[in-house]
Amino acid sequence: PPQNIAWVMPNDPWITARTPPMDTCMQFIETCLMCEASSAHKGLRTSIEFMQHGFHELEMQGKVFRIDPSVEPTKFVNATLDGTEVEVLRRVAANIIRRGRVSRISDSGSLCFADG
């Protein structure tokens, strides 16, 4: 059952939708530029804001997903899933551990994280 799964996720990812697919990386860059050109997004202060606005636009178009809609993804891993697969992953989202990377698992099953 999903409640028995602990998922260690150091960074929440943006995930590419299988349908409708994002044509190319150039489509992503074009989307970012179009968002920047719109009056609502003029003068973005950082490249991170520039990229995130592009991802938000693609999310509205159904071309990318995030596993937990309440968490802002920080990575793009270019995994490709359909909506049904994302919904399966979301069932485990309540048990995501966002503490960093696991350095080892003890004999008793305790997780030891690289950052302590």
Image: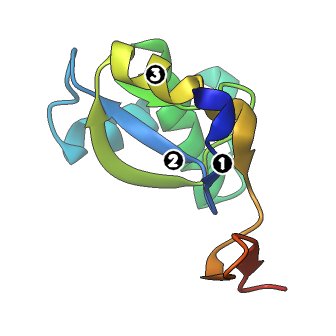
Q: Which mark is residue 96?
A: none
Percent position of residue 92, x then y: 61, 32
- Under circle 1, the secondary element is loop
Q: Earlier in the sequence, mark 2 or mark 1?
A: 1
User: From the viewer's perspective, is 80 left or right of 5?
Assistant: left
Residue 37 visible in rendering: no
Disc 2 crowd rating (10 Å Cα; few below 14, some 14-19, many 20+) is many
Q: Nearer the viewer, residue 115 or 14?
A: 115
Residue displayed at 59% across by 23% down: 91
Identify residue for label 3: 88
- The amino acid at mark 2 is Pro
Residue displayed at 77% across by 65% down: 99
Percent position of residue 75, x then y: 51, 55
Indicate how the structure is coloured in the image.
Answer: rainbow
Q: Earlier in the sequence, mark 3 or mark 1?
A: 1
Write down the quadrant of residue 16 in the picture.
top left
The answer to the question of whether label 3 and label 1 lie on touching residues, with beta carbons closer than 8 A, is no
User: From the viewer's perspective, is 76 left or right of 74?
Assistant: left
Q: Which mark is residue 13?
A: 2
Disc 3 crowd rating (10 Å Cα; few below 14, some 14-19, many 20+) is few
- The amino acid at mark 3 is Val
Q: Is residue 70 above or below residue 50?
A: above
Write down the quadrant of residue 82 in the picture.
top left
Q: Earlier in the sequence, mark 2 or mark 3?
A: 2
Identify residue for label 1: 6
- Under circle 2, the secondary element is strand
Point out the image quarter for the C terminus: bottom right
